[in-house]
Amino acid sequence: MISSFIVALWILLAPLQAQAFPATVEDFFSRASLNPYTDPDPTWAVSATINGQTFINKGLVAFGLIPSNFTDSTGDTMGGIGSAIALKSGTFTKTSGTTYTGTIIAQPDRGYNVVQTVDYQARQQEIDFVLIPFYGPGNLTFTTALNTLQLTYKGTTLYYERNGTDTTGLDALGVRPQMAGFGIDPNADPAMPIASASYNHLSTDAEGVAFNSDGTFWVSDEYGPYIYRYSATGNLIQTIQPPSAFLPYTNGALNFTSVTDPTTGRVGNQGFEGLSLDPTGTTLYALLQSALVQDGGSDKSTSRYTRLLAYDITQTIPLLVGEYVVPLPQNSKGNTLAASEAHFLGDGIFLVLSRDGDGHGGSSDKSSYKQADLLDISGAIDIHGTVYDNATNPIANSGTLVSGITPGTYVSFVNYINDTQLARFGLHNGKPADQTLIDAKWESLAVVSCQDPTYPDDFFLFTASDNDFITTQGVSGGVPYNAGLDNDNQFMVFRITLPSTPRN
């Protein structure tokens, strides 16, 4: 499979190869005089202040992609990988003054489902990269820009539930009764979302991912919405069920389907999108994509107030220790820009990726909001263990927060669709709808130190898109499909300055 990826990139970069493409990317930049700069242009800097701390966005520094028709080692189209990413522990290395290498773990969601959900086994993809940040003046061509972040597929880890049974991306039309083990209670685990009574496989729409130091990892799911812990080899170990207010009930019965909204609980396809561990690896945070039904979530104009949960995972049974209200941004029409990812930075501050659904592969070509913003919960009221964990007590009515609840503070930060920054890498926002159009769905964040002694508080912010498996040459479960459009998996890297606090 690695060879097919290289071939795809070889075709994509044909114009450069015709010009005697150099042996190394670093050599390419040197010959072309494109990268003699080691620092971002200070005129690009955009600062944001939250809780008395100043954060700086120094701009876009790298871009890469995985072609839409690339297949992984199982033979399935490799798509949706921007649903969650993480940098594999211990792999990020500065190999020279301008070059970095490392490994990305990318987790797709539930597979190609433009027409309907499919029997797609949840998984993660391992991708090696070479990063050579571009800080120079002027604009690169699109094909040249691809040299700034080279991506090489390494392998796939599939997810299994109990008894080695494959997970599935099929809509959760059934409910499995409580069974011993695997749960938040030592004697029973929560009722689980399954495809159907006749197809007893755990329905999984995997979104967030966070890794423990022992190699096990947490996965947040939209169907439940639950949080699952897996072994390093992808076998289910444990399940976290959130408070009852989060669970999808229809007329008093659990109803995990994503097709229709329940009476109370999470809105369909609006489960736990964000997942992050604190730097000590002791607290796990999960962010709901938008408001619960009873909090106004069924209407985009009233779905602003979502919730963030905090779990102490040092306990054998993870313990809920915090719950906070998050005020998501809204567009000019007053509609909520739902959250697609969250990343804990420290001191009660998070990056939250909020966006619209426009761009390549989206509702329209022109996007108006895609940002990694700042969230501070240090002054927010903790509502865990209160009446609000019961669905009969909403935190908001018709989009208005209940009196007495102090939400977190939300501040604009990294703008993905800045025209100047996109143009530097041969990209654009709006027509034409070609390969250089910014993707619609950006859903992942990862942060790592630049290892620059001159700027010790500078970090690279990696982000990737969920292309919805959209390709004209797709394969799912051995069956070919044509989505009518080729939508690559895009990756961007920004350089940001964070205050001097511990980072994960």
Image (spheres, grey):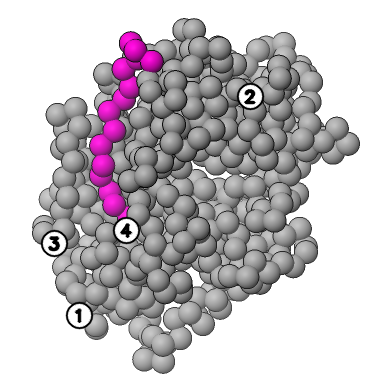
Measured in 3D between alpha carbons, the distance from the residue under mark 4 to the one under mark 2, in whole angstroms, is 36 Å
Nearest the viewer among 246 and 28 is 246
Give amino acid for label 2: Thr
Measured in 3D between alpha carbons, the distance from the residue under mark 4 to the one under mark 3, in whole angstroms, is 18 Å
Q: Nearer the viewer, mark 4 or mark 2?
A: 2
At a point 25% along the width and 44% down the height, the residue shown is 413
Q: Secondary structure at mark 3?
A: loop
Measured in 3D between alpha carbons, the distance from the residue under mark 1 to the one under mark 4, in whole angstroms, is 27 Å
Task: Specify the farthest residue to the right.
Answer: 198
Measured in 3D between alpha carbons, the distance from the residue under mark 1 to the one under mark 2, in whole angstroms, is 61 Å
Image position, residue 202 (x, y; %): 73, 35
At a point 29% along the width and 37% down the height, the residue shown is 374
Q: Nearer the viewer, mark 2 or mark 3?
A: 2
Give amino acid for label 3: Asp
Q: Using the image, determine if residue 84 lies above or below residue 163.
A: below
Q: Secondary structure at mark 1?
A: loop
Question: Where, by quadrant of the figure, is residue 329 drawn?
Answer: top left
At a point 36% along the width and 91% down the height, the residue shown is 19
Question: Where, by quadrant of the figure, is residue 316 drawn?
Answer: top right
Residues at marks 4 and 3 touching, judged by CB atoms closer than 8 Å? no
Nearest the viewer among 413 and 201 is 413
Q: Earlier in the sequence, mark 4 or mark 3?
A: 3
Give amino acid for label 4: Ile
Image position, residue 415 (x, y; %): 29, 52
Q: Earlier in the sequence, mark 4 or mark 2?
A: 2
Residue 263 numbered tag: 2
Question: Does the magenta segment cover residue 124?
Answer: no
Q: Disc 3 marks which residue?
A: 41
Q: Disc 4 marks which residue?
A: 417
